């Protein structure tokens, strides 16, 4: 297996944390209560921390003066590998929570497997990150329940968010040619094996929250191949602003 | 209580403060002491929460991952400070909702410095270095203030603020050692934040209405002008060390006083901003009000859910 392939694989994992962290970072100071504000910022911090560990490793793999920041900030939109789910906007708190929950359940299952990776760097990152993500999952699950079984308004809002974001869940389990090689080498995670436990966990929580599991079988994909929704360009305009305006400087 | 009894109890209260004893929430206290503390602690809490906005403005655009994480953590610290200051304030018999109401309607004030915009990355450095630096000078004496919950909250707040101040200075130092554009950015930020930072210590002693009573209750240990002088003396050498120029042509070392003389503060600007007409007053309050209003259905849901949970537990117990 080539270093470049491992590099690409890491981007596919880390970009999810980067972009979701960025989305949560937008909310800092605007939460519905101080407690939720602090919690969302905390999750964002965890995700950026994970991103840094992955990118520091990725930068070492490709050499050529690459750093965590060149990897994070200096790619074009088509080179980001995150799933479409994590780039969806903070339409309201229900969307923020639904996006978080639908990702956290996957993230936890994923890291639980990545812990067993033959790649010691990745397994070390996974071992640390899973502790954080187990908290994220608890936080978002609790809020799904509160909103689902709270007031009629909250139930309607969280149901709308789940219905709307549902079409982005299937992409979590798509694999590329690179994935296949990485899995074969005992480094990566076989995503197809996560699909059943994922949906059974999600459906269980939705039921406990008195919410309806969407029936739609129409799904969206593209993020993993760098074909993003229209939101992505704006996320990057913000995120890359300093690096693009003032190239090659130390901050 | 007879008038005499009240006099005795007040005398005992004053004596306790004179002996540096802490006043605790359930202790008797004069109504004015309670009101003054509600005013000051809530003003402080509001400043933390409104202060999240100008810095939060740069989280999505921070220039490196390291800076982004540090800024997020810093703004989160401010939220934490708000949380324990509101809690300290609640011990005086007022709810967080009432305190928010006072902020949103303009009845309560917050630090005017946050009504200035953060327009470049260097502003994040300048806020940490100057604004947190000024805040520390204001706040360190409060670690020994007479009201127990406030004093204890301040010990933690000050530790974190001191870290923020060093972090801000380090941002400025990196810029000052960087390219021409970076150095210009740093100097520009110092130019814009210097005078508002000096205004953070409040009106001159002659104009300050609360000073005398606050000194008596150890809510204040030094006057506004003394603290302002301390800030100038501390900060000018820090600017010189990294090659930045303090934007005050009258700034001069006074050998006799062993202190810096500095130029006149534009008090018209100060009062304009305090009275709600600074560059960002409207936006800051709008941001707080809309976060609160947009969050109402979320808070209602959490309350309704908690109630349902409790009801089902009671039912099971029966």
Image (spheres, helix red, strand yellow):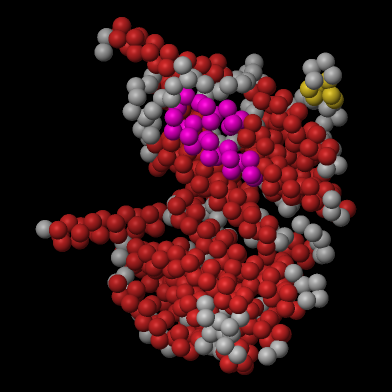
Determine whether A248 is above or below B34 in the image.
below
Q: What stretch is highlighted in magenta?
A: B138-164
- Residue positioned 53% across, 69% down in the render: A129
Q: What is the count of numbered marks?
A: 0
On the rendered structure, is B13 left or right of B105? left
Does residue A54 appear anywhere in the picture? yes
- Residue positioned 80% across, 20% down in the render: B258
Q: Assess whether residue B144 is covered by the magenta stretch.
A: yes
Q: Assess whether residue B281 is covered by the magenta stretch.
A: no
Determine whether A69 is above or below A119 in the image.
above
- Residue positioned 48% across, 85% down in the render: A170
Outermost residue toward the right?
A: B180
The quarter in which the C terminus of chain A is drawn is bottom right
Name which quarter of the figure residue B29 lies in.
Answer: top left
Dominant secondary structure (helix, strand or loop) of the stretch shown in magenta: helix
Foreground residue among A204 and B94: A204
Foreground residue among B268 and A46: A46
The quarter in which the N terminus of chain A is drawn is bottom right
x then y, percent, for residue B135: 62, 35
Does residue B106 appear anywhere in the picture? no
Foreground residue among B294 and B154: B154
x then y, percent, for residue B274: 61, 32
């Amino acid at each position: 297996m080539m270093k470049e392939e491992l590099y690409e694989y890491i981007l596919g994992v880390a970009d999810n944390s980067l972009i979701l962290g960025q989305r949560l970072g937008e909310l800092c100071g605007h939460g519905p209560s101080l407690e939720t504000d602090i919690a969302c910022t905390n999750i964002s911090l965890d995700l950026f921390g994970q991103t840094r560990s992955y990118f520091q490793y990725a930068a070492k793999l490709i050499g050529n003066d690459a750093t965590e920041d060149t990897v994070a900030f200096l790619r074009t939109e088509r080179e980001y590998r995150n799933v479409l789910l994590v780039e969806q906007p903070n339409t309201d708190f229900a969307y923020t929570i639904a996006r978080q929950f639908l990702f956290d359940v996957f993230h936890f299952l994923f890291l639980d497997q990545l812990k067993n990776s033959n790649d010691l760097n990745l397994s070390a990152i996974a071992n640390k990150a899973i502790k954080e993500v187990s908290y994220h999952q608890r936080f978002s699950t609790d809020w799904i329940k509160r909103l689902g079984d709270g007031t009629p308004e909250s139930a309607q809002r969280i149901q709308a968010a789940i219905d709307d974001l549902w079409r982005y869940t299937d992409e979590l389990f798509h694999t590329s040619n690179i994935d296949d090689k990485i899995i074969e080498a005992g480094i990566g995670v076989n995503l197809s094996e996560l699909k059943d436990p994922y949906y059974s966990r999600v459906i269980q929580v939705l039921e406990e929250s008195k919410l309806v599991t969407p029936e739609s079988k129409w799904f969206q994909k593209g993020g993993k191949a760098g074909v993003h929704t229209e939101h992505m360009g704006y996320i990057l305009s913000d995120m890359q602003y300093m690096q693009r305006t003032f190239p090659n400087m130390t901050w | 209580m007879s008038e005499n009894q009240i006099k005795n109890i007040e005398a005992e209260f004053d004596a306790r403060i004179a002996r540096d004893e802490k006043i605790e929430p359930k202790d008797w206290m004069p109504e004015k002491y309670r009101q003054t503390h509600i005013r000051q602690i809530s003003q402080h809490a509001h400043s933390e929460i409104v202060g999240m906005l100008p810095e939060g403005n740069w989280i999505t655009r921070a220039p490196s991952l390291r800076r982004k994480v540090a800024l997020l953590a810093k703004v989160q610290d401010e939220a934490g400070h708000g949380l324990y200051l509101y809690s300290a304030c609640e011990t005086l018999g007022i709810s967080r909702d009432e305190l928010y109401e006072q902020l949103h309607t303009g009845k309560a004030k917050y630090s005017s410095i946050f009504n200035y915009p953060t327009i470049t990355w260097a502003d994040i450095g300048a806020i940490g270095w100057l604004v947190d630096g000024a805040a520390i000078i204001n706040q360190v004496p409060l670690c020994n203030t007479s009201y127990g919950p406030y004093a204890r909250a301040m010990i933690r707040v000050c530790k974190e603020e001191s870290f923020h101040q060093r972090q801000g200075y380090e941002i400025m130092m990196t810029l000052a050692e960087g390219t021409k554009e970076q150095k210009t950015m740093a100097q520009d930020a110092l130019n814009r934040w210097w005078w508002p930072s000096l205004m953070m210590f409040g009106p001159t002693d002659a104009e300050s209405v609360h000073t005398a009573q606050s000194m008596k209750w150890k809510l204040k240990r030094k006057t506004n002008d003394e603290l302002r002088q301390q800030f100038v003396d501390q900060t000018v050498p820090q600017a010189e060390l990294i090659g930045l120029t303090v934007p005050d042509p009258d700034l001069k070392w006074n050998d006799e006083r062993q202190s810096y003389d500095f130029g006149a503060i534009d008090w018209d600007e100060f009062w304009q901003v305090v009275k709600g007409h600074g560059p960002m007053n409207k936006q800051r309050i709008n941001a707080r009000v809309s976060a609160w209003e947009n969050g109402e259905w979320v808070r209602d849901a959490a309350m309704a859910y908690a109630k349902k949970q409790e009801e089902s537990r009671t039912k099971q117990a029966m």
